[in-house]
Amino acid sequence: MKKILFIILFFLILLPDLGAQRRRGFMSLRNRTFNRATGSIIASVGPSFCIGDPYASIFKETFNNGVHNYNASLGFRHWFPNNFGYKGTFTYANYAGSDKVDKFHGGLPYSYVSNYFEASIRAEYAIKFGSRWGRIPPFAVYGFIGGAYLNSIVKFPQFDNNGVSMNSATGSRYNSGFAIPFGVGYQYEYNKYITIGAELMAKYSLTDFIDGYSSSKTSNDLIYGVSFTIGYKIF
């Protein structure tokens, strides 16, 4: 009987220490989970618009003679344990606009369709929050800014005497330059591998030729839009 009482007393003495070690191990695992580095392949698509020289509403041109004013991209994102990170991206976009009232475009209403290609690298900082299974923060909001090299191939639809666009092209213009992308985003970890989210972005172009036209009366072209993202975590 004394031996049994001694064994019970021994375990009662050790129990708080075993619990503390278990909690320390759990916190260590939790910290490793919260602060782990991640790498993901990110695809995105969404509407975007180029603010250039045409004065008419760009929204009217989105479904005029095809689908315009959208962007699609594929990239790689790496977030470090300190929540800083970077993302490299290749983007294709299509922009269109028209000018129904002649302002200064050589006596004709101005119209363009631009096929836009871009390679960019940007720095990001994320704030992660929420919990799932007691250890994984599934939500993140982040901001970003970076640099991009762009190339645009522009076609100019013809106009008849009434200023109505026709389905033909009289020429094209090839342009390249640099831009500064910046914006904010949101990401949700759907499961261990899949993420979904959205971004609000703008790109300040260092060229005025994305729409194929430049004038001293206007500033450089500006791109803005919304992208919906889906990612696959590779580590």
Image: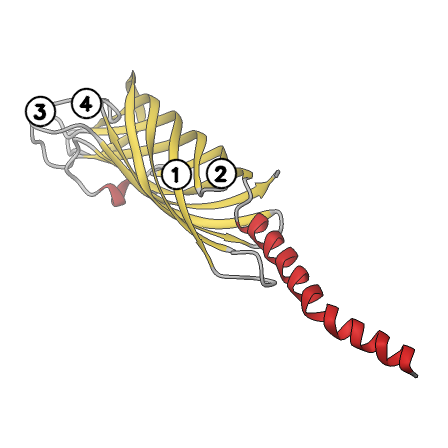
Determine whether, in the image, residue 117 is placed left or right of residue 51: right
Q: Which residue is mark 1?
A: 124
- Gap in angstroms between the C-alphas marked 4 and 2: 42 Å
Q: In terms of sequence position, does the residue under pointer 2 or pointer 3 come before the other?
A: 2
Residue at 62% over, 50% down: 192
Callout 2: SS? loop
Which amino acid type is shown beneath numbered disc 3? Gly
Callout 3: SS? loop
Q: Which residue is mark 3?
A: 107
Tag 3–tag 1 contact (CB < 8 Å): no
Callout 4: SS? loop
Tag 2–tag 3 contact (CB < 8 Å): no
- Mark 1 vs mark 4: give the one in front: 1
- Mark 3 vs mark 4: give the one in front: 4
Quadrant where the image shows the N terminus: bottom right
Residue at 79% over, 77% down: 9
Q: In terms of sequence position, does the residue under pointer 3 or pointer 1 come before the other?
A: 3
Which amino acid type is shown beneath numbered disc 4? Tyr
Q: Which residue is mark 4?
A: 213
- Mark 3 vs mark 1: give the one in front: 1
Residue at 26% over, 25% down: 210
Callout 1: SS? strand
- Gap in angstroms between the C-alphas marked 2 and 3: 55 Å
- Gap in angstroms between the C-alphas marked 1 and 2: 10 Å
Q: Tell me residue 28's x, y (percent).
A: 60, 52
- Gap in angstroms between the C-alphas marked 3 and 4: 14 Å
